[in-house]
Amino acid sequence: MNRNAFSRPRRLWLAGVVASLAIAGWTLGAQQASDPQTVVNNAYNQFKALKEGKNADYIPALAKVDPNLFGIALVTVDGKVYTAGDIKTEVSIQSISKVFTMAQVIQEQGLDAIEKRIGVDATGARFNSIIAVEGVKVVSGTGAPEMNPLVNPGAISATSMVTGANADAVWKKIIGFHNDAAGRSLTVLQDVYKSESDSNQRNQAIGALMLAYGYIKSNWQQAVDLYTRQCSIGVNAKDLAVMAATLAASGKNPVTGKQVLDAGKVPGVLAVMATAGLYDDSGKWLYHTGLPAKSGVGGGIIAVSPGKFGIAVISPPLDDAGNSIRAQRAIAVVSNALGGNPYAPRK
Ligand code: DON
């Protein structure tokens, strides 16, 4: 375009208009959808009738959860809460707990501990793959290249790394960290804990193998039991969003004001979530949203827009990779409308 298409006063006027829009926080195109409550409501209405996917049933209690349950919660780094749908009903946190137990180990033992003992790379396999365990046995203790704390073998190993004189002491630390991130006292859903304890032979096999290959140093049975318990913690969509917002706000719970995780340790946690949070669909997810995220087979997904907000959706029906279908769609729509992608140009 001819540089002189606009006269200097006209260019200054245009610059002023653009600057005012930037101050408002959003570009003209996104402005209509910039109010977070409107965006959350719109996403809820857009997806409330979506019926694709199926509840997890390899843990029998999960098959009984109402598949119509659907709630969205978004919490900003300054503690504002926006919700739609059912944000009261609790589901089991499942694999989302892996993020917070990993974070606790990083908090106590540093970023190196997780990288060297477990690894921070994608396995390219399902979350409970035994082939993935076989693939890394030769490198145990040397910084396993194809393992991470968000798949079951790495997660059971991370749980085994939480220090404490006995199982009760370790559990107090695990639940305490989850409570601090959520900003309230969470409890274990006993029916889910019992159901998974009765049916987790595969995780027991994984625990035993991780001991045999040197990832777990002792007492794999205790590690598997505490891992099963942490997966059975009951959470609602708002709890999960506050937990995600704690990571978005550099480790400080924006509702309670408590610093849960050192700010300098948060990027490492988010990096593992970006790499492996949605298992072998993590790449696709990142491609479309840019958000570090984590799913659980209870139907929850959390996602983090660093410096902006945490978001969570609960909807039990899953896709083949084990990720909630409605949660993926709703989070992507909300985040994209609010400029949540950290790789996109800042608005
Ligand atoms: O160990 C399991 O199989 C479950 N407690 C957790 C798996 C899970 O949530 C995978 N996530 N999408």
Image: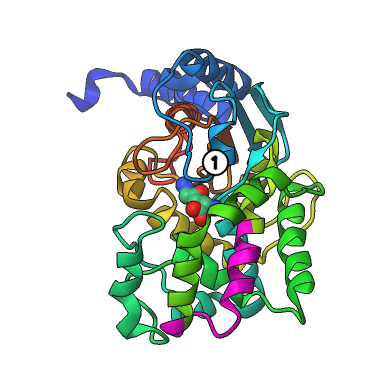
Where in the figure is residue 184, as x and y percent of width and height? Answer: 81, 47
Q: Quadrant of residue 173 in the image?
A: bottom right
Count of marks, rendered view: 1
Instruction: State the residue at coordinates (39%, 23%).
Output: 52
Where in the figure is residue 47, as x and y percent of width and height? Answer: 47, 18
Up-down: is 127 above or below 136?
above
Q: Quadrant of residue 83 in the image?
A: top right
| Residue with the most extreme left position | 1
Amino acid at circle 1: Pro
Mark yes or no: residue 250 visible. Answer: no
Where in the figure is residue 107, as x and y percent of width and height? Answer: 65, 71
Q: Quadrant of residue 92 in the image?
A: top right
Q: Which residues are magenta?
A: 212-228
Instruction: State the residue at coordinates (49%, 61%).
Output: 201
Mark yes or no: residue 168 visible. Answer: yes
User: Residue under circle 1?
Assistant: 60
Q: Tell me if 241 is positioned left or right of 320 in this view.
A: right
